[in-house]
Image (tube, rainbow, N blue to C red):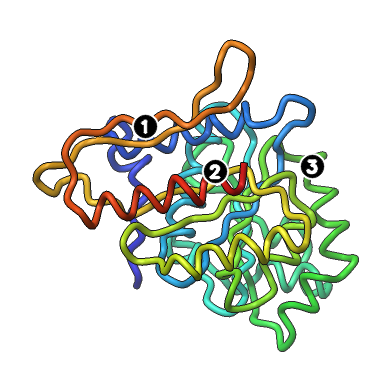
Amino acid sequence: MENIDIITIKNPRSPIAESYRTLRTNIQFSSFDKKIQTIVITSSGPSEGKSTTSSNLAVVMAQNGNKTILIDCDQRKPKLHKVFLTSNQKGLSDLLVGNSVFEEAVEKTEIENLDILTSGTRPPNPSELLASTKMKNFIENLREKYDCIIIDTPPVIAVTDAQIVSRYADGCLLVVASAQAEREAAMKAKELLVKVDAKIIGVVLNKLDIKEKGYYGYYYTDYSDEGEKKTVKRRSRKNKKQRLSLSFFSRLKKSVN
């Protein structure tokens, strides 16, 4: 079984867990006119950490008292049932085609306030199913039941699923793996989301090696007294590879603000 470490559960006092709580706070204050209730999380390519980000963000949202549901919309390579050690026999696809009911498909986790809806039986036409009126209505109905809806989708370049689902969401997070994601791919991912009017609320820089000698630092979003969003950067010495990664991340982040 693939091991995705939910560090916000295993080591809640770690700096990385604190980063997820900072991400939670930034999301909550990223919009002044409308609550960010439904969040799509995607990446440009595989293995960039979107499922890890989705899982940890869902946990810290729930820990903050928000009734939260985490949905696995990756019908091709689902992972969340492995993360939370739950069954995937009944899930989102089964619910949408009428082979299951909500109470049967949704499961509670050991985390208070956190439910999970796995991907379910793999359908022959994932994109068509996600683009259906049933899917749109389902997400709308969830708004009445939950304070926070987090949707884990496939990489946006590989298939259209993330583009489709992002139209139902209040915001979209793009996960970028440090020193792994190609610059052109990350920019292409952003362009594909913008093309469908997805509301990109941020870019998450993932897999940054903070243990490597000569580096300590982080990026986060802050707000001025006038409410203007700004990027604050704290850093010390970094090697060339890290400098290039953070420089590109900074430019990509500015391009979605």
Q: Are marks 3 and 2 in contact (CB under 8 Å)?
A: no
Q: Residues within 10 Å of mark 1 (few under 14, many from 20)?
A: few
| Left or right of 21 on screen, residue 241 | left
Q: Position of residue 68 (x, y in %)?
A: 62, 41
Front disc: 3 or 2: 2
Secondary structure type for disc 3: helix
- Type of amino acid at the residue the image marks with label 1: Lys
Q: Check the image and report above or below for 235 versus 10.
A: above
Separation of disc 2 and disc 1 at Cα? 13 Å
Q: Residue furthest bottom?
A: 124
x, y percent for residue 123: 70, 83
Mark 3, residue position = 143
Q: Marks 3 and 1, Cα distance to the nearest angstrom?
A: 35 Å
Residue 215, image x and y in percent? 17, 41
Tell me the quadrant of the picture where the C terminus can be found.
Answer: top right
Quarter containing the N terminus: bottom left
x and y percentages locating residue 176 in the rendered image: 44, 57
Q: Which mark is residue 254?
A: 2
Residue pictured at 52% horizontal, 77% vertical? 77
Q: Earlier in the sequence, mark 2 or mark 1?
A: 1
- Amino acid type for the residue under numbered disc 3: Arg
Residue that sits furthest to the left in the current view: 213
Judge by depth and name the residue closer to the eye, 147 or 44: 44
Of the two numbered discs 3 and 1 on the same chain, state the one appearing first in sequence: 3
Please give the name of the residue rendered at 54% of the width and 43% of the height, measured from the top-left corner.
254
Question: To which residue does mark 1 refer?
Answer: 233
